[in-house]
Image (spheres, rainbow, N blue to C red):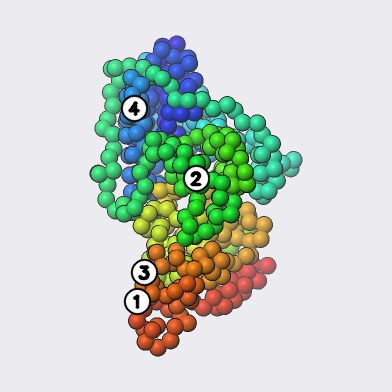
Amino acid sequence: MNVSVVLFTADLRLHDHPPLRAALDGSREVVPLFVRDAAVDGAGFAAPNRLAFLADCLADLDAGLRERGGRLVVREGDVVEEVCRTVTEADADEVHMAADVSAYARHREARLRRALEARGRRLLVHDTVTTVVPPGELTPAASDHFAVFTPYFRRWSEQGLRDTFGAPRRVRVPEHVGSGRLPSRADLSGLSPALPAGGETAGRKRLAAWLRSGVHAYEDRHDDLSGDATSRLSPHLHFGTLSPVELVHRARRAGGPGAEAFVRQLAWRDFHRQVLAARQDAASADYRTRHDRWRSERAARDDIEAWREGRTGYPVVDAAMRQLRHEGWMHNRGRLLTASFLTKTLYVDWRVGARHFLDLLVDGDLANNQLNWQWAAGTGTDTRPNRVLNPVAQGRRYDPDGAYVRRWVPELGALAGAAAHEPWKLRGLDRAALDYPDPVVELAEGLDRFRRARDRRT
């Protein structure tokens, strides 16, 4: 076989890349191809923060290929049309790509397979590129997927992992295959000011630092809001600049309770993918428990805007929402408590929050984002769907001295210690001097509203 095409999607790396390895093993020349997909942009998933990170990833991938004698071919338009055009130009026999789970990705794969077969070419789809265990490989006795994490994790942990491999030493690309211009972060506006850099090089540096000095304390500190003791690898997992299989191998080699807790989070990522693979409509429809009496967006408009802007009057909620806007990223504990506050204290449809997160998150992953929102809203896989996170109690527990609040809500910078979590307890001139709003709702009122709505459903 002379030429193969490797279609890069959410796997923008050279290390541990099964489609690229298979193409190089079977072909004299390989076309590494990325298509800027017009359909994805049109569906609203091309948020500025993710486009900027993507531009970094593509530039780094191209640089890595050039170091090995190759280059990245970039096209823009309908992905099936552009792949077929590239196949014709290169006179390629096969196309290799990674499996994915969204409804759009599966439709894309089916379209591409039909189009290539009509031209006498083959499509080869590879598992364990973007997941550790392929969706659908683990199933309980009476269902096509696991709906509860704990039994899934038990089975997931028993699975053997494939071996990983390094980046190729050389990649030969046909010279006559043309390419468009690489996108650039400089072309974009409306970015979060502290958006991190993308690309495999940056991802591998962060991973090395994390394994060297962060993972061992992860079990004890992963919920510490001010300590910022999480890996921050989620954007690199979303864009595939790091291999999840490699992460599990390396974390297990590091050993200890912190590494085990980190691996558990990677299993949660696979868990959500196997749910979405089996229930495609869970991206937009309630997965398990229906909530039919959400407040309308019109009625809740002011509360929703206060939540988006980080002006709810609950400091830890506002701190997390401001971190999201500034960094394009939010601490996982912040994601849980801001989602619980919107859906259960304000009783607003989870889809409103999920859309806002996808507008800003650089790691805005459909499976993780939508299904974590459903978990918080009580419509998803949470086995305790009626739990409500109290933002004051959460703040006192996970930001006990108020440092996280003071970092992101400077209006409260003068409040010492845990007092930052309850500024409404100030009186007189001290309270009036704060440029900070009163709570948009009393917690007892929000809880009562949620319980009444829950009781009407049952």
Q: Marks 1 and 3: in contact by CB < 8 Å?
A: no
Q: Earlier in the sequence, mark 2 or mark 4?
A: 4
Q: Amino acid at mark 1?
A: Asp
Secondary structure beneath dot 4 equals: loop
Which of the two marks, 2 or 1, is nearer to us in this view? 2
* Cα distance between the residues tagged 2 and 1: 39 Å
Q: Which residue in the protein does label 4 denote?
A: 72
Secondary structure beneath dot 3 equals: helix
Position of residue 23 measured from the top left corner of the image (x, y, whole percent): 46, 19
Which of the two marks, 3 or 1, is nearer to us in this view? 3
Position of residue 315 measured from the top left corner of the image (x, y, whole percent): 45, 70
Q: Earlier in the sequence, mark 3 or mark 2?
A: 2
Q: Earlier in the sequence, mark 3 or mark 1?
A: 3
**How busy is the neighbourhood of tag 4: few (under 14 within 10 Å), some, or many (20 plus)?**
many
Q: Which residue in the protein does label 3 denote?
A: 410
Q: Marks 1 and 2: in contact by CB < 8 Å?
A: no
Specify the quadrant that holds the N terminus: top left
Q: Earlier in the sequence, mark 1 or mark 4?
A: 4
Q: Which residue in the protein does label 1 denote?
A: 435
* Cα distance between the residues tagged 3 and 1: 10 Å
In the rendering, which numbered label is found on residue 213?
A: 2
Q: Is residue 439 left or right of residue 216?
A: left
Q: Amino acid at mark 2?
A: Ser
